[in-house]
Image (spheres, grey):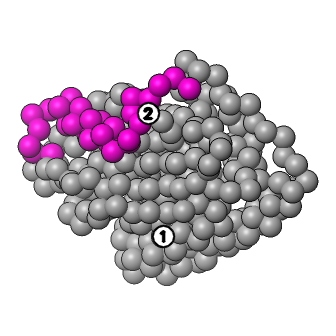
Amino acid sequence: MVTWVGKAPCPEPKPITLRGWLRVIPRGLALGVVVFGGLGLYLLMRLFERPLNGHLRPWTGRLTQAVCRVAITLLGLRYKVTGRPMEHIGAVVANHSSWIDIFALNACQRVYFVAKAEVSNWPGIGWLARATGTLFVVRDPKQARAQQALLEERIRAGHHLLFFPEGTSTDSRRVLPFKTTLFQPFFSHGLDKVMQIQPVSVIYRAPEGEDPRFYGWWADMGFGENLLNILAAPRHGSVEVLFHDPVDVSDFPSRKELARYCEDTVRAGLPWDPPEDL
């Protein structure tokens, strides 16, 4: 459920014309075949990968990247990657604007998302998330120790876990304050001595003539409505993934300083943040 609500109202969705539907149908079918066909192949590969490699996913990780790159192409977005994903043990933090973030961030690196437990029950998205190794966080103090142990196990196994510290998606024009509690596990049980954090800015540029917030997904926008509007668009803009230099967790005295540094770095990557209210 998208919960952030800005001061300015969401743009009214444009009615989909006949020409728009003629774009929606082939794009939607192609996207469905690639995503769910890829998921079927992914699950089949895991039958052999799991007993041979355990937590490591050398085959399915590559498949996920390929599927996400093709999905972006089918959506019609121009795609650019600036900088390089880190290779050191650690985690990635990024701003969150849209469900497209999942494709954009997966297409250029091997990461495993960290999401709130409710996401696992979302139609379609939850199924994909569970199958591709997403780590779901339960907001229950009684399960905090078990969650911490699972997170540590995944990081020490070499998984690059990806967090959205804003806690919600936005209109793509701003970075909300990072929730510092999400950074606390990095300072437990010696993880701060061995891991790095890499901030990443995801930058969307709307199609010419469209609302600058065209790719944002926020407030009470429905996923289906947002997806149809994007599939129906006659032209598209672009998405850029900007990798900032990774930093050692041990360089920061506490989670608050680390969260502030990552927030400031991610925000600096967006050329229009702080934005004017649109």
The three-letter amino acid code for the residue at tag 1 is Gln
Label 1: which residue?
Answer: 65
Q: Nearer the viewer, residue 142 or 215?
A: 215
Q: Position of residue 134 (x, y in %)?
A: 47, 54
Q: Nearer the viewer, residue 10 or 96?
A: 10
Q: Is residue 31 above or below residue 14?
A: below
SS at badge 2: loop
The answer to whether 212 appears left or right of 13 in the picture is: left
Q: Does residue 231 appear anywhere in the picture? A: no
The answer to whether 171 appears left or right of 240 in the picture is: right
Q: Is residue 81 magenta?
A: no
In which quadrant is the C terminus drawn?
top right
How crowded pointer 1 is (Cα within 10 Å; few <14, some 14-19, many 20+) is rated as many
SS at badge 1: helix
Q: Is residue 271 magenta?
A: yes
Label 2: which residue?
Answer: 174
Q: Which residues are magenta?
A: 249-278
Q: Position of residue 62 (x, y in %)?
A: 45, 75
